[in-house]
Image (spheres, grey):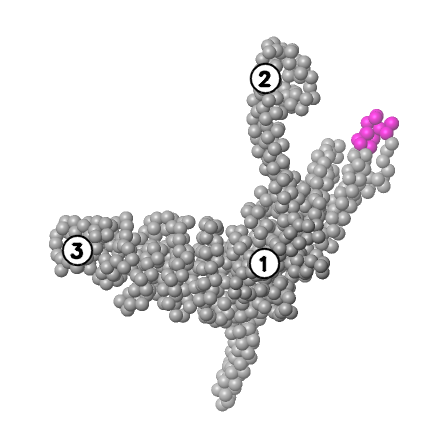
Amino acid sequence: MYQAAPQDVKTTLSKLRTSILKHDEDKALELIDHMDSTILCSLDDSYGSLLQLAAAAHTEGSKVLVKLMSKCPHLLLEERTGRFNGQTPFHTLVSKGDVRAVRNIVSNNPFKKYCGLLMTVCSDGTSFDGTVMMGQLPLTIAALTLNNKMVDALLEFDTDFKLLPSSNKKGDTVFHSLIRYSCLYPEEELNVQNMMRYLHHHFREEPPRSLWRISNHDGRTPLTLAAQLAQSRLFTFILKLEGVYSELNGQDGLFDYLNYDITEIDPAAARDAKNRAETEREQIRNGKTQAKDTFGAETEQQLRNGRNQAKDTFRAGTEQQLRESSTQVQETTGTASCSPVDFSSKAAFQSVLEIVCGSPRVDRAFKILDNHVVKQVVREKWHKYRRWFYAWGILHVSLMASLTAYAVCKAQAIISHRNARTSLGQNVQNISQLHESMVLAASVLFFLLSLLLFAWEALRIVRRHPYYLQLPHHNGLYRVQLILFAVGLFGDAVWYWIADDHYGNYFLILALLVGWWFTTFFLRPFKKFSFFTVMIQKVFFGDLLRFSIVILLVYLSFSVAMYIVFLPLPPPEFQGFDKTLLTMFELMLGQTDVKVLHEAPTPWLAVLLFVAYMLFTFILILNSLIALMSNTCSAVYTAKESNREMQKLAVVLFIEASLPRQSCLHIVGAHCKWQRKMFDTGEMTKEYGYAEQVASLHRVRKDRPRQPRYLDEPDGSRHTSPDTLDGGSWEHGSSADELLYCLRFQLPTNAR
């Protein structure tokens, strides 16, 4: 064995390191053979241990790697620190796709004892963000490399099915990480979907839905994470997994009837499932407590009386109580029931509908909203709430008409009250006492209405409904309008009561303007207006806001220049900087005579500034604004159908956020229970939820694709038959319009 001075050891390790990096296996093996394992473990530089260096630099089948693992097997657990924190040689081998080396580690006895720990080490260094190593766990890294053989090699070790349910430091399982990877690399979306299917079929325990219901630290299941990241294809793939979110409920030859679990889609269903699970857990706890209390009371009574049959009574009473308690527990599958989503997370739970409505990726969110199951849920909820919505709209218009009449009558009453104290009141008709009493009563009613609106908004804040002010299709801006409306009513009423002669109608004007503008909220679900409400907000808070910043700079700079040009004897239009600002604004709109420019001490300079000012503002900036607005309007109009569905969803969520949780919410689908395995305890529980039946065309299975078939239209045009597109296969979940279109083209030409 090699023994040398510390300086020689350092030199030898440096040579060994260089040999490994240069792939000089013969020299590296020779050096390893003559070195003690203690010396081999002493190297620790920026690359980590020697085994880490060999794992990163070696080629498949390298003898150096095998030799190092044989002499220093514990180096497999050596983790790097800093930017590469948590990375072990095993992580490196998995990420490189060295299946032979990984199989050697998980199958051979000298290394197999380390595998349990290796499978749970998380590589969470900052340098791994955006790479396959972001999965942290070895199995997840193997899945992100999209290497089926590597996944098989790791799953061979997983005889008790614990690898797939395991999660990293973010709480993400392998499915969460795959969805994140697909979001970063959209070109790998199909391969990610295939890997998800491959892993799903590897999980042979029942029920398979348990694996897909694991939430990360943000409370996101793979389904809701796919919705959050706007991965519409992966969302549809997960939703169609049979035995997880969908179950075949029947066929009639033409249609398949599937039950879809919509608990995570519908916010009302998710919260109801949570309440049911909590209620049942509370009942179980109460049953156990009652059994313990009875047990203690009977035992104490038996000991006090000192009866000889105390022991028998004790046993009988205890057995009967435990039998009743155990019967009650068995009815709930051994433990307390659970809800399909994790509400214990610090982050507030969001259903798919809430995530879609709050998504900044609007174009991608439209695709998720276009999913046939999501669309059906939204439409059913809209049909339930639309009567309330229409009634609210009529009530609001009536309220604004009353507020307008109140404003007019109040103005007359105030004028009469003020004039009555002056000599001007001799020629003014006095307002009757009844008129003043009605105005006072109306102010009280509007004051109470403002308190109701404040309480209404406070309820939404307590329930942690975000505003999303940057999203024009969300409810945030309308909530702000209601707050301003309430502030206007509240401030006007209070000021009217306490101000006496110093009352001003500023708050009333605010309430009138905001209240009437809020009527656009009731135009959102209508086809003719839905895109218009979105367009106005996009133009106002997008194009117009950017335009205002630019034109303000030009406007102020030229106003200052023009003010200086007209000194020291400016005409009335330019006397003072405030009047100069107003005059320059009028010049921009063409409302002021340009002859005033000749009154400047240097007329040619004033005219030159005016020409430059008009070129910048009127010709360049204003026309640029018009072009931007045209593009925005065109983009919104193109997606008007999707905008309409999104507006309906936003209205539904707004109504549900304002209603009591239990009594008034409409839950789509039928109440169901499913079995679910809790991986942390290994126990089976019952999971509450809701299922919705959806009909779709029967799936056509075939061995080979069909040739395109063309159909002639009566007008002479030709179309490709839909039943031959994409190989002639119809997937589950076609919409009603697609079904009718399909059936229409499947009929012979002479039969139409």
Residue ID at (37%, 59%):
138
Residue 154's spot in the image, x, y percent? 37, 64
Residue 342 makes an appearance in the image: yes
Q: Which residue is mark 3?
A: 31
Q: Which residue is mark 1?
A: 724
**Of circles 3 and 1, which is in front?**
1
138 or 443, nearer to the observer:
138
The reply to whether the C-beta atoms of the residues labelled 2 and 3 are less than 8 Å apart is: no
CA separation in Å, label 3 and label 1:
66 Å
Asked if residue 724 is positioned above or below residue 673 in the image, the reply reads: above
CA separation in Å, label 1 and label 2:
68 Å
Residue ID at (60%, 59%):
723
Q: Which residue is mark 2?
A: 609
Q: Earlier in the sequence, mark 3 or mark 1?
A: 3
Amino acid carrying label 1: it is Thr
Which range of residues does the magenta coloring cover?
415-428
Q: Secondary structure at mark 1?
A: helix
Q: Secondary structure at mark 3?
A: helix
Image quarter of residue 274:
bottom right
- Is residue 419 located in the magenta-colored stretch of the structure? yes
Residue 293 makes an appearance in the image: no
Quarter containing the C terminus: bottom right
